[in-house]
Amino acid sequence: MVNNLKGIAASDGIAIAKVYLLTEPDLTFEQVEGVDVEVEAKRLDDALLQTQAQIQDIRETALTRLGEEEAKVFDAHLMVASDPELIDQVKSTIKSDQINAEAALHNVSQMFIQMFKSMEDNPYMQERAADIKDVSERILANLLGVKLPSPASIKEEVIVVAHDLTPSDTAQLDRKYVKGFVTNIGGRTSHSAIMARSLEIPAIVGTGSIVESVKDGDIVILDGLDGVVHINPTTELREDYEQKGAEFEQLRQEWAKLVHAETKSKDGKSFELAANIGTPKDLTGAIENGAEAIGLYRTEFLYMDSQDFPTEDEQFEAYKAVLEGMNGHPVVVRTMDIGGDKELPYLSLPEEMNPFLGYRAIRISLNEPDMFRTQLRALLRASVFGKLRIMFPMIATLNEFRGAKALFEEEKANLINEGVKVSEEIELGIMIEIPAAAVLAHQFAKEVDFMSIGTNDLIQYTMAADRMNEQVSYLYQPYNPSILTLIKHVIDSAHKEGIWAGMCGEMAGDQTAVPLLMGLGLDEFSMSASSVLKTRSLMSKLNYEDMKQLAEKAINECTTVEEVIALVEEAKKSI
Ligand code: PEP
Ligand code: MG
């Protein structure tokens, strides 16, 4: 039996609580023939009542925690759970074939699922198939007496353990009860990790086998600082960790004093510290953590949390809320970045061998101009409510930027013609997350208003190492001299053309990277809100002039990551 497991520290903090295993339930059953038809019909009715009550419960939770839009999914589920056509067919199958309720339900629901699924061009029908699958699994679980895990219904303090968490699983976690989570797969930049940091709950990902190593109710210590999980610890170890947790809390309180402080190096050079957000709801965390701007608003969550393409008005409301909430401080809104590990059920994307190298982000937007124009119009309309900067993701070529800019200009002219007011101050920028764009940053810098380095992708593409694959996570090397050299080229190119360079990948909040990035002259650092204050604290203790030398040395003299880390550690000792 293992008593501890190492993983990747994905979100700071210490938590001690019971395990809540979020695993795929075992719903296998035998087909039984020659059954008592009345008994089986009654079992089905009972399971249906139970199912309806459970869905109602989840719906209530989703409504209070997430809002009307998210709760709508469960309305559709309730309709399936009481759909007379489906129920009658299951009952008549029990009768005609004299088989148990489980088998009858399975046969009928499969028939409906296949029927809806075959209507490939109709996203609505695809959704219906997904609803029927979901609900029939729940009915089956109730027939079998199996408890289905549901992150939204957790009502006691737990640490969630799962093979992986999808963005929608993570969105359902309530930080009041969920004290942290641990997964088998994933890396520091997988979206579950990013969500954990925005929820400000400790998390460890990529442990390889946590699901196989614990059972429901085990006590675990989640050390999100060092990336270690201790399973059923001794009282002594538990006390040590309670102490460590308290010390970390104290440090947090120290950082909290810097909420309204300016971001400056010890020798007075200013930097902009911004936060990354996924939804307007994350704004509170960003402001409470003292972010001076929003450096990345990932708008794809607006699409992913919706049952269909969000309308222009829905998008306008979301963008307006963020711009107004930031009260004149800059907001970088990134246009939709679907693809890679972010799916959109109603935009049936093709199965791909290499989704991260496939059809995603700006590639989709330029190929689906109607969808893209809707987003641009919503942004333009919202622009009068604050200081808007629009950023295009996954730009590989200048032509892609020019194409996106042309659509932006067209929609701007259209709106003006329609008599709608738009801001004349909108900056248009790009993410530098593809090596081709980093290498040609000096050319991009002549045409864009800003460049923000997306290191999560830039590192995976430069090192050819999937950011989701923990087996190659050792190659996720932010301080590799090759990465630092690319970053330097981007920053120098921006400055040469008189524009600013930022970073919105997770590296911007990495405490070993920050001294190097300061030295390279990065203007804006955008990170998970929970990293803002500790970064401000670190920056205030370092001299910019010294960091310039440090960065130069790292790039010119170091040949390995280990050498760079040693160099930074040495420099940090003097603070
Ligand atoms: C990045 O690639 O660094 C980035 C910020 O984008 P995302 O993590 O959303 O791909
Ligand atoms: Mg990216």
Image (cartoon, grey):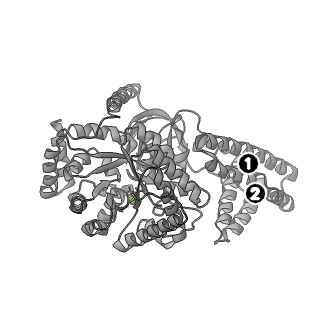
Is mark 1 in CB contact (under 8 Å) with mark 2? Answer: yes
The residue shown at (32%, 60%) is 451
Tag 2: amino acid: Leu
Mark 1: secondary structure: helix
- Which mark sits nearer the N-terminus, 1 or 2? 2
At label 1, the amino acid type is Leu
Against 126, residue 511 (above or below) is above
Q: Which residue does the numbered mark 1 point to in the structure image?
A: 143
**Residue at image point 71% right, 56% down:** 30
Label 2, ligand 1: CB separation under 8 Å: no
Q: Is residue 2 visible?
A: no
Quadrant hosting ligand 1:
bottom left
Q: CA distance from mark 1 to mark 2?
A: 10 Å
Q: Residue at the spot x=59%, y=41% of the render?
A: 65
Residue nearest the observer in this picture, 507 or 273? 273
Q: Report the side of 477 relative to 205 (left or right).
A: left
